[in-house]
Amino acid sequence: MLTNESCTIFIRNGLGFDRFFVPKCHWQESISSAVFKDGFQSKDGITVYIFVKDITEMLRTELNTALSNRKKAAKDIIVKGECNFEFDGSSQQAASESIKKLNANYDVHTVMSIDRLLYGSENMQHYKITANNGVSR
């Protein structure tokens, strides 16, 4: 699979986030809509593929550890490209203000799921992240 972008994944750890910059990923956006008898519904989504062969062993280990320790994927966020934002997780109010600042300065998306598909040949092993096009906090 071709890589067309980089991304930064923020995985929730208490009030703050662990940040992971992924220099190579495949970022795919989709827009779908449907007409129902109660109205028009539109859904935008993002799917990001991170191939194991494109990341360092250290990043893979740190990412797996953070994913194993997290409580809910819906609290995680992803940003297209490199994002060096630092969260202030010292209090609930500081964390809330940090999220507001991040949303104001970056195109932030809420992670819906992170699948670790780490089986088969090395060329096939990857992480699949699905996210909403936008953030809800």
Image (cartoon, rainbow, N blue to C red):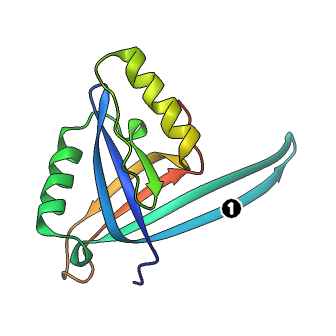
Residue 22 sits in which quadrant?
bottom left
Residue 105 is left or right of residue 65, and the answer is right
Residue 16 is left or right of residue 81, and the answer is left
Residue at (45, 23) in percent of width and height: 96
- Residue 49 in view (yes/no): yes
Figure disc tally = 1
Q: Nearer the viewer, residue 2 or 18?
A: 18
Residue 48: image location, x then y, percent? 44, 64
Q: Is residue 17 above or below residue 83?
A: above
Residue 114: image location, x then y, percent? 35, 53
Residue 66 sits in which quadrant?
top left
Q: Name the residue type under label 1.
A: Ile
> Helix, strand, or loop for circle 1?
strand
* Residue tagged 1: 31
Residue 78 is left or right of residue 71, and the answer is right
Q: Is residue 106 above or below residue 71?
A: below
Q: Is residue 58 above or below residue 93?
A: below
Residue 120 sits in which quadrant?
bottom left
Residue at (37, 16) in percent of width and height: 92
